[in-house]
């Protein structure tokens, strides 16, 4: 870890799909324990940015540093870094053939080489954290979306990651299920987990995030604390964007 | 009722044929999985060159009649390699290698049916590509494939009778021998047919049981 508490550094990330330039040089630092929410219109590269951080998508240019080590260009060591960068997906992507607890423990056993007994214990502990220990023996098909997402958070937690990336974790959920997932995330944030969250949940962003990044057209257009973004006049575009949510909520 | 006595008299000889037939089918199925499954993985995840080679293999073994393959291997390839192998071995090998070609396509479809997110999630927790395939993709693909794969059993079972042509002492060969010894045709061939039908039925029952046993909520039709 670096002296100033920076756990993750993202430098000048560029990514194009064909002619479409999705990311046009994104740079930011993340301090340990920080929760950053990425907001902005759909199709502005927020999810692509998250995937570039753990190299699920290979950036065309730029670098990612985790605790002072370079993640980009790390060759086979990328699998090691991915253990330290948890990821939670919009559509959960739980392993469909495994029970909830097997979903959480499999990487501990197969990747970490932990013995099955310890792995089970740890997996159960993580499920308890997200309030899913009673569902340990159920298959993904038997879980609600909110439950599945909480299991997938437990799966990410099990690897004791330095940072967790949330890619629109509640976009596939109805409001009630969204709330149960957001509550778990809020608890994690308060417990000091470093989190990058792509979300359209403005309430969550404003109440939990230390910093909000407003992205548009592949760039971070505006960033600041929730208070700054809401009050300061220079954050015109971001306020307009958030304002649209308030209007629809008011109907 | 001469033929009843004949059949009872020769039945132990037929039983030997049943074992040989089951041996052929069993080894062919196992060989088919051992070669077919990695070939399917190679076809989905392999480099272009690997996919090309597997493509040629599949094209070859699916493109030739079983009888032609049997003669090729029995009179050509094995002797050419200086190997003097029993006909049973040739039969099992040909049925197995041919089965692998068909099975690879069954498994390939099943692997491709596993959603992309499964691989992404597996990689995201730090699994290598190979670990992801082994621990996440294949366990799902095999469950998807099993109903289609079960079809291979009656296919290979019925195909196995053609090993008669190279003199494998299986059910069909022994039946013909009994016929030529006793000059009783129809009843004996009917017994042979009856045994094939029973083997077919029994085998399908076993496969069905396996299918049920490894069933997981969320897989296959009428799931959960």
Image: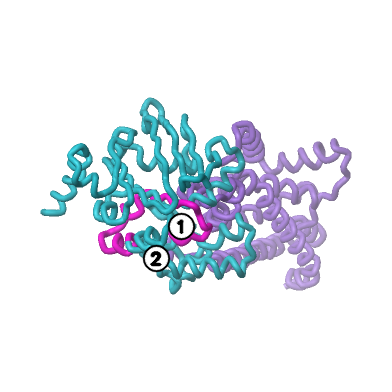
Chain colours: A cyan, B purple
Left or right of residue B54, residue A125 in this image = left
Expressed as whole percent of the image width and height from the top left, the position of residue B201 reads 60, 65
Left or right of residue A143, residue B17 in this image = right
Q: Which residues are magenta?
A: A153-182
Residue A156 in the magenta stretch? The answer is yes
Badge 2 and badge 1 both on one subunit = yes
Residue at the disc numbered 1: A94
Left or right of residue B45, residue B163 in this image = right
**Residue B207: mark in rendering:** none
Tell me what residue is drawn at x 55 percent, y 41 percent. Answer: A69
Labels 2 and 1: the sequence-earlier one: 1
Residue at the disc numbered 2: A143
Expressed as whole percent of the image width and height from the top left, the position of residue B202 reads 62, 67
Vertical placement of B7 versus A220: above or below? below
SS class, disc 2: loop
Residue A141 in the magenta stretch? The answer is no
Residue B114 visible at all: no
Left or right of residue B37, residue A143 in this image = left
* Foreground of the two, A194 or A170: A194
Residue, far front? A3
Question: Which chain letter matches label 2?
Answer: A
């Amino acid at each position: 870890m670096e002296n100033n508490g920076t756990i993750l550094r993202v430098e000048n990330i560029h990514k194009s799909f064909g002619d479409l330039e999705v990311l046009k040089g994104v740079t930011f630092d993340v301090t340990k324990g920080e929760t950053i929410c990425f907001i902005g219109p759909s199709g502005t590269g927020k999810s692509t940015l998250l995937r570039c951080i753990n190299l699920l998508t290979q950036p065309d240019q730029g670098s990612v540093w985790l605790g002072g080590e370079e993640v980009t260009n790390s060759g086979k060591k990328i699998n090691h870094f991915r253990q330290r960068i948890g990821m939670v997906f919009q559509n959960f992507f739980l392993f469909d053939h495994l029970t909830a607890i097997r979903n959480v423990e499999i990487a501990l056993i197969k990747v970490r080489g932990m013995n099955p007994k310890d792995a089970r214990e740890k997996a159960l502990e993580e499920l308890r954290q997200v309030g899913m220990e009673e569902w340990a023996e159920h298959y993904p098909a038997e879980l609600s979306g909110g439950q599945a997402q909480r299991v997938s958070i437990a799966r990410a937690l099990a690897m004791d990651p330095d940072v967790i990336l949330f890619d629109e974790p509640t976009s596939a959920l109805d409001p009630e299920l969204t709330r149960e997932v957001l509550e778990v995330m809020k608890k994690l944030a308060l417990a000091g987990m470093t989190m990058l969250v792509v979300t359209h949940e403005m309430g969550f962003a404003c109440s939990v995030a230390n910093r909000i990044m407003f992205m548009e057209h592949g760039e971070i257009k505006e960033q600041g604390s929730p208070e700054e973004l809401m009050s300061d006049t220079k954050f015109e575009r971001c306020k307009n964007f958030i304002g649209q949510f308030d209007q629809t909520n008011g109907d | 009722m001469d033929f009843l006595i004949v059949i009872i008299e020769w039945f132990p000889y037929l039983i030997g044929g049943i074992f040989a037939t089951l041996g052929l089918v069993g080894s062919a199925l196992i060989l088919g999985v051992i070669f077919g499954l990695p070939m399917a993985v190679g076809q989905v995840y392999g480099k272009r060159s690997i996919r090309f080679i597997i493509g040629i293999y599949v094209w070859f073994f699916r493109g030739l009649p079983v009888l032609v393959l049997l003669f090729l291997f029995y009179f050509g390839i094995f002797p050419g390699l200086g190997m003097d192998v029993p006909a049973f071995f040739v039969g099992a090998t040909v049925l197995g290698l041919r089965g692998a070609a068909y099975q690879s396509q069954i498994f390939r479809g099943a692997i491709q049916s596993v959603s992309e997110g499964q691989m992404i999630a597996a990689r995201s927790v730090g699994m290598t590509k190979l670990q992801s395939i082994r621990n996440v993709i294949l366990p799902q693909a095999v469950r998807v494939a099993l109903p289609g794969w079960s079809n291979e059993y009656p296919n290979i079972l019925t195909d196995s009778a053609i090993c008669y042509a190279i003199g494998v002492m299986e059910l069909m060969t022994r039946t013909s021998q009994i016929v030529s010894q006793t000059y009783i045709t129809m009843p004996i061939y009917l017994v042979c047919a009856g045994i094939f039908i029973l083997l077919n039925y029994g085998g399908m029952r076993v496969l069905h049981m396996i299918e049920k046993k490894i069933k997981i909520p969320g897989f296959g039709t009428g799931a959960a």
